[in-house]
Amino acid sequence: MFNRLFGKPKQETNALTTLDKLNETLEMLEKKEKVLLKKAAAEVEKAKEFTRGKNKRAAIQCLKRKRLDEQQIEQLGNFQLRIHDQMIMLEGAKATTETVDALRTGAAAMKAMQKATNIDDVDKTMDEINEQTENMKQIQEALSTPIGAAADFDEDELEAELEELEGAELEEQLLQPATTAPAAPVQVPTGKKPVPQKRTAEEEELANLQAEMAL
């Protein structure tokens, strides 16, 4: 259908050739128009000279030739308008053909991609991915399962034993005697005697022991 409306690729080449030919013809007509405009202007100048020379008949002949030149100029202008119109139509047809060809190419590419990735293939691929993922999970679980002697250990018994160890550690910490911090030096104001500090039982016992050792 598109070939009937817009032609085949070979016809596109013909359209380009036709456009080139029309451009050449347009340039030729423009050159002729410039020549005729100069001739018409020259006939006007001649008519003025003959008028100044009182040669009325020659002046009228110059004006007649000027009129003929102007008719040809008008005809050439009409030819140029026709060629311009034809060129615009050909360029529009060429742009339309290229647009349709690009749309046709895009539609064919999309159709090919849809054939390569139909919904059934997508569903099958997703099922395979899910199956492989599930198999990998099972493999990882199998590898993490204890084997040999470690498989016979009771997790509840191990947790109970750990709690006993933690309780014994806490009880041992509570039974340890607290260390006595050294007494901070007392600042005695100037002019006053220091007040003797009262000894604790442990300090009294230590002093007596040091006295006996000195004997």
Image (tube, rainbow, N blue to C red):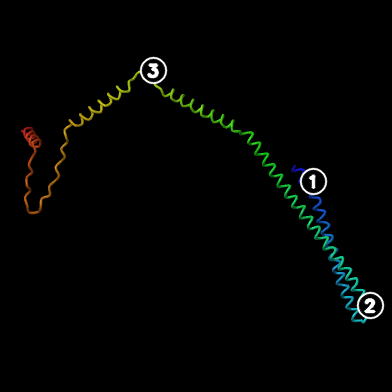
* Local SS, label 2: helix
Mark 1 lies on residue:
11
- Picture quadrant where residue 149 is located: top left
* Local SS, label 1: helix
- Horizontal placement of 109 versus 16: left or right? left
Query: Which amino acid does the dot numbered 2 rest on?
Result: Arg
Is residue 206 shown above or below 137? below
Give the CA distance from mark 3 to mark 1.
Answer: 84 Å
Q: For label 2, count other residues whose C-alpha is less than 10 Å away and answer few (under 14), some (14-19) or many (20+).
A: few
Q: Which mark is residue 45?
A: none
Is residue 43 shown above or below 53? above
Give the CA distance from mark 2 to mark 3.
Answer: 136 Å
Residue at screen point 90% across, 71% down? 65
Residue 159 horizontal/vertical position (percent): 30, 25
Query: Which amino acid does the dot numbered 1 rest on?
Result: Gln
- In the image, which is nearer the foreground, mark 3 or mark 1? 1
Seen from the viewer's position, the closer of residues 47 and 81 is: 81
- Horizontal placement of 192 versus 135: left or right? left
**If you read the primary sequence from the N terminus, does the residue marked by circle 2 or circle 3 appear first?**
2
For the C terminus, the image quarter is top left
**If you read the primary sequence from the N terminus, does the residue marked by circle 3 or circle 1 appear first?**
1
Residue at screen point 78% across, 57% down? 85
For the N terminus, the image quarter is top right
Residue at screen point 89% across, 78% down? 49
Residue 213 horizontal/vertical position (percent): 8, 32
* Local SS, label 3: helix
Residue 96 horizontal/vertical position (percent): 72, 49
Mark 3 lies on residue:
148
Mark 2 lies on residue:
57
